[in-house]
Image (spheres, rainbow, N blue to C red):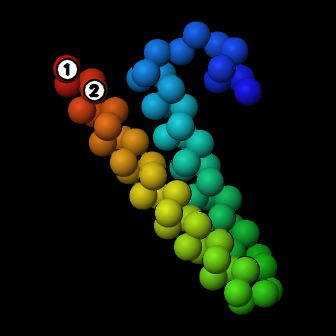
Amino acid sequence: MEVFKMKLNTKEILKKKILDAQEMVRDYEVYSKRIQDVEVADLFKNFAEESGHQARKLQNLLKKISKD
């Protein structure tokens, strides 16, 4: 993995993972609208929500760390 090869500090890692989680939200939302199978589409909608929660938690943690 690229992250482990680079020397990143905590803030840089958090920023990268926030972007990753946001990208997952977009991907799951787009795919959920394209997929005909209702069960898979619903699962992807749930995954999009979960990824959104992860992104928000990471953003809050980054804000907290940045204040220190």
Residue neighbourhood size for the residue with mark 1, other residues' Cα within 10 Å, grouped as few (<14), some (14–19), many (≥20):
few
Which residue type does callout 2 highlight? Ile
Would you name the residue on which mark 1 appears?
Answer: 68
Nearer-the-camera pick, 35 or 47: 47
Residue lying furthest top:
7
Q: Is residue 8 above or below residue 36?
A: above
Query: Which residue occupies 46% across, 15% down?
Result: 9
* Residue at the disc numbered 2: 65
Q: Position of residue 6 (x, y in %)?
A: 64, 13
Residue 13: where, in percent of width, then height?
50, 26
Q: Is residue 23 above or below residue 64?
A: below
Specify the farthest residue to the left. Answer: 68
- Which SS class for mark 1? loop
Residue 18: percent from left, percent from top: 49, 40
Q: Is residue 35 left or right of residue 50?
A: right
Q: Residue at x 40, y 42 (%)?
A: 58
Amino acid type, mark 1: Asp
The answer to the question of whether label 2 and label 1 lie on touching residues, with beta carbons closer than 8 A, is: yes
Measured along the vertical axis of the image, is residue 60 above or below residue 40?
above
Q: Is residue 42 left or right of residue 16?
A: right
Left or right? Give the position of 42 relative to 18: right
Secondary structure, mark 2, is helix
| Quadrant holding the C terminus | top left
- Kindly identify the residue that appears in the image at 58 percent across and 10 percent down: 7
Image quarter hosting the N terminus: top right
Q: Residue at 48% across / 22% down in the picture?
A: 12
Occupied quadrant, residue 46: bottom right
The furthest residue to the bottom: 38
Label 2: how many Cα within 10 Å (few below 14, some 14–19, many 20+): few
Alpha carbon separation for disc pair 2 and 1: 5 Å
